[in-house]
Amino acid sequence: MNIQWYPGHMTKTRRMIVDQIKNVDAVCEIIDARIPVSSRNPDVDELTAGKPRLVVLNRVDQADPEATRLWAAHFRKLGYAVLESDAKDGIGTGKFAGAIRELLAEKLRAYAEKGQVGRVVRVMILGIPNVGKSTFINKVAGRKTAKTEDRPGVTRSKQWVPIDRGLELLDTPGILWPKFEDQSVGLNLAYTGAVKDDILDIETLGCHLMTYLSSHYPDALKQGYKLSALPEREDEENEVAYGYRLLEAAGRKRGFLISGGEVDTERMAKILLDEFRGAKLGRFTLELPQ
């Protein structure tokens, strides 16, 4: 499975970040709490060097709570401010303005000493496609200002969003990177819907996800698909082959049968991805700090 995803508008976004970074006081990077490594564009550090950073761990409602605690500590250790959020339900978004002002407290004091009280603070919002960036901005603003949709690549141009008299956000289109050197990054982005489903083989994707969940969250898998036990993985059996057997076992329990009594594994793979993305099987984190 070779996942590549770099539409032309992402090149444009990269240029826009370089052009606009001098106009902002801080950078807010929104990442998916389930995949904190894979949902961070490695170019962002270079593009925004020197700017104070707030990392928003979004979708914490779908992530493993213990793993989220470890990630929050990890990013604070790197010197970033951290905010945990479930943008869809507005959890954590009310703390955003305070977190930014705390992050920029020194700069704001310096402004005040120069008599620039009330100077507008400008923050660039960055994140990969479909990470919940537009939803987060709308919740922070308390109104619908950014277009949202549950698919990647919806925001296509920059827009300034006033939050209050002293705070403005610069919304930017989601940006990925030209090539995934580590294939697991591409898989993680695909599981969470950050890349379009139609550029991938859903069944193969489902096999990989099934195998991961069987290793790290076996009880959730057994409970979710009413399996008394998971099939034993055979020696020499690769990830996809074992995942396919898991899809068959789950699909049979769900009654997804086609002619000849075979399991419709493609349908089962689609259901698995839907249930994973909707946290219907449980709260999972696919990466941990080193």
Image (spheres, grey):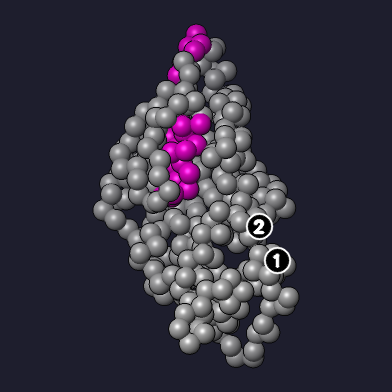
- 177 lies above or below 93: below
Is 136 in the magenta? yes
Q: Which residue shows up at 40% across the image and 44% down it?
A: 149
Q: Position of residue 264 (x, y in %)?
A: 48, 77
Between residues 70 and 138, which one lies in front from this camera angle? 138
Q: CA distance from mark 1 to mark 2?
A: 10 Å
Label whose residue precedes the other's in the sequence (1 or 2): 1
Do the CB atoms of the residues marked 1 and 2 lie less than 8 Å apart?
A: yes
Q: Position of residue 172 (x, y in %)?
A: 37, 39
Q: Position of residue 31 (x, y in %)?
A: 52, 48
Tell me which amino acid carries mark 2. Gly
The residue to which callout 1 is attached is: 223
Q: Nearer the viewer, mark 1 or mark 2?
A: 1
Tell me which amino acid carries mark 1. Gln
Between residues 179 and 161, which one lies in front from this camera angle? 161
Horizontal relation, residue 158 to residue 182: left or right: left
Disc 2 is placed on an element classified as loop
Disc 1 is placed on an element classified as helix
Q: What quarter of the picture does the C terminus occupy?
A: bottom right
Magenta stretch: give its range: 114-139
- 196 lies above or below 32: below
Quarter of the image for residue 19 reads top left
Q: What quarter of the picture does the N terminus occupy?
A: bottom left
Q: Can residue 239 be seen here?
A: no
The residue to which callout 2 is attached is: 282
- 261 lies above or below 97: below
Q: Position of residue 233 (x, y in %)?
A: 65, 85
Give the class, few, some or many, for how many residues have Cα within 10 Å of label 1's Cα (few <14, many ≥20): few
Is 242 in the magenta? no
